[in-house]
Amino acid sequence: MRARWAGPGRAAFLWLVVAASAMAAAPTVSLPELRSLLAAGRARLIDVRSREEVAEGTIPGALNIPMSELESALRMEPAAFRAAYSAEKPKLEEENLIFFCQTGKRGSQAMQLARSLGYRGARNYAGAYKEWFQKGGFHPPEPT
């Protein structure tokens, strides 16, 4: 006869297993994958840093929606979104809706928020702008 493990210890253990599985399955994008997706035109980037941070530089083609505005932006009607951000609102079914910030924390929060609102293809570029800049992923402007 096999003994069953019960009690609060079992619940805590199961919670840790679920949390670890969720973290392991977190949809993240690496720098090489991001470069490949961008080269193929298969990624939509959203920079969730503040406008002041973005003024210092961003990944080319990224749309800036500060984290403080993200939930309301993703809940907007398409016409209101277009008026506010001069861009088309992401569709719930977009495959590679990639969020990023400076170091990864806000990007991860943004991805989780978007997924909770039904954006199934929401992902996080975990290396964030810091990695993009440090590893030469940026394209400096041409001299004038």
Image: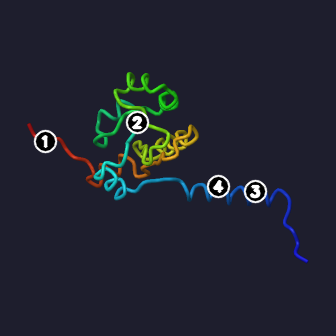
Image mark for residue 49: 2
> Are dots 3 and 2 in contact, CB under 8 Å?
no
Query: Which image quarter is the N terminus in?
Result: bottom right
What residue is rendered at 45% in x and 44% in y?
Answer: 94
Spatial CA distance of label 2 from label 4 is 27 Å
Name the residue type under label 2.
Arg
Spatial CA distance of label 4 from label 1 is 46 Å
Q: Which residue is mark 4?
A: 19
Q: How is the image coloured?
A: rainbow
Q: Earlier in the sequence, mark 4 or mark 1?
A: 4
Name the residue type under label 3.
Ala
Name the residue type under label 1.
Glu
Residue neighbourhood size for the residue with mark 1, other residues' Cα within 10 Å, grouped as few (<14), some (14–19), many (≥20): few
Q: Earlier in the sequence, mark 2 or mark 1?
A: 2
Q: Which residue is mark 3?
A: 12
In the rendered image, the vertical position of residue 54 relative to residue 2, given as above or below: above
What residue is rendered at 41% in x and 44% in y?
Answer: 100
Q: Position of residue 49 (x, y in %)?
A: 40, 36
Image mark for residue 142: 1
